[in-house]
Image (cartoon, rainbow, N blue to C red):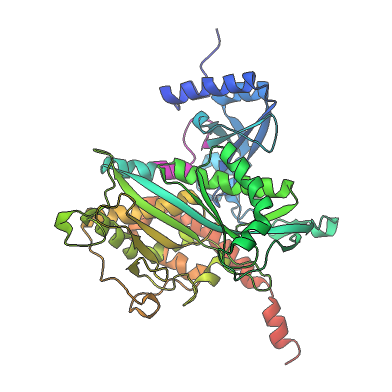
Amino acid sequence: MTGASFVERHGLWDAERQAAAERLRHVLAQRGMHSLRFAFADQHGVLRGKTLLADAASRALAEGVGVTTTLLAKDTAHRTVFPVFTPGGGFGLRTMQGGADMLMVADPSTLRVLPWAPGTGWVLCELHFHDGTPVPWDTRRLYRGLHGRLEAAGFAFVAGLEVEFHLFRRLAERLAPGDAGVPGAPGVPPEVELLHQGYQYLTEWRYDRIEPALEVLRRDLLELGLPLRSMEVEFGPSQVEFTFEPIEGVAAPDAMVLARSAIRQIAHRHGLHASFMCRPRLPNAMSSGWHLHQSLRRRADGGNAFVPGPDDDGAPLSATGRAFLAGLLAHAAGATPFTTPTVNGYKRFRPHSLAPDRVAWAQDNRAAMLRVLGGAGDPGTRIENRVGEPAANPYLYLGAQIVAGLDGLARGLRPPPSADAPYEAEAPRLPADLAAALDALAADPVLVAGFGAGFVDYYARIKRAELARFAAEVSEWEHREYFDLF
């Protein structure tokens, strides 16, 4: 008689997950699949993991897959910024010391069969130490906990994902040994060229030129089970936008993580380069945003809690929606390290650029940070947050909305009047850079309590390490400005 598995010993799966695991094993066998990718979203929202052959994967579902804890100690250049070989590993946790292992435990309900990699499956995981304790820096688990608070208040979070990105033709990989880079100094980016010129927003001729590339993405994303809704030519050169049908709960950030990784993989296999960097350093490039449409579903009756009723005196949102909106405004500055987590993302906050530069809301106005859409009788009534960048960790971006909105609900906050001219409104400015954003987060007790002081300190340490590397770099601007002058 065999002993209990890791999942059984620690009670990690409910009956639904156990049934999903059996279905997963059945799919592996019936479809003759040879590999299963176990993946988790790291602190940056980047998927990391291991690929196991089918027999080993079937066993590992209930036992977990070991990976090093140092994956949680890295900045965006894969540089380990914590002293992992000191007592506590720089985290104050014995279980993180010495580059010790942790276990990826699959959520079997997230199984996808990869249409671009024949015979290969893909499953999302959460992280546990060997004693069964959850790893505190696991952002998917963190989001599930935050959404649980929302459910306890009687709601579910509904998200509509609207993400812009750049899609180029790849000319050269730049794979000479000298191009490889090292941790803390990434390698040379690939050479690319445009798929279409810019500034012809939604022009059908431009769309048709790139339709063959978009068709490859459309086909595989739908086969992956992602609810793709539209594909559009965006404003800038080689810039596109994808939107997805509304998604509820943890499935929403899961979908964004999977879509972003899938688009990059599919594009690469077809000689393309997809980038979710906010503002590439290329001539005439435009900034890309991630506009997050959000509403709350009442768990009691399934209705949209933001739709105003007869007692709302013509307001564009219900009392619940207005309080949620006020919470988003109250914590907008502190949330920016989660909505806009890169140095590059703050290049987007410019007036008259279709991106926000201050904390304001308006009804159906694309210049405002928060754009309210819908109204009485419209089941699609929602708030669109236009502050985010496509590189954001989805679990942290959406989680920040929940923490801020819940505070608005708990305190009965009321939003200020609508800003009909958002770029001229007397409203607080968004943080000008990542350093100011991190200061705003540290000064926001509601966000610190919501995410946990330990997590906020951990996240800020990684981001400040990135800032230190950025500050130490001699930029082209500095060289051009001073080298000949002085």
Q: Let me know if residue 138 is in the magenta part.
A: yes
The quarter of the rendered structure image containing the N terminus is top right
Q: Is residue 366 above or below residue 232?
A: below
Q: Nearer the viewer, residue 276 or 337?
A: 276
The quarter of the rendered structure image containing the C terminus is bottom right
What x and y, as percent, mark residue 134? 47, 37
**Furthest-top residue in view?**
1
Residue at 35% in and 70% down = 360
Is residue 288 something that shows in the picture? Answer: yes
Is residue 455 something that shows in the picture? Answer: no
Residue at 34% in and 41% down = 148
Q: Is residue 33 above or below residue 292?
A: above
322 left or right of 365? left
Q: Is residue 227 above or below residue 401?
A: above
Q: Let me know if residue 388 is in the magenta part.
A: no
**Furthest-bottom residue in view?**
485
**Furthest-left residue in view?**
311
Residue 384: image quadrant is bottom left
What x and y, as percent, mark residue 9? 47, 22
Q: Nearer the viewer, residue 395 or 443?
A: 395
Residue at 58% in and 67% down = 344
Residue 312: image quadrant is bottom left
What x and y, as percent, mark residue 397? 45, 54
20 left or right of 344? left
What x and y, as percent, mark residue 167? 66, 58
Q: Is residue 443 above or below residue 74?
A: below
Q: Exactly how many numbered labels are in the figure?
A: 0
454 left or right of 32? left
Q: Nearer the viewer, residue 54 or 30?
A: 30
202 left or right of 408? right
- In this picture, which residue range is highlighted in magenta? 126-144
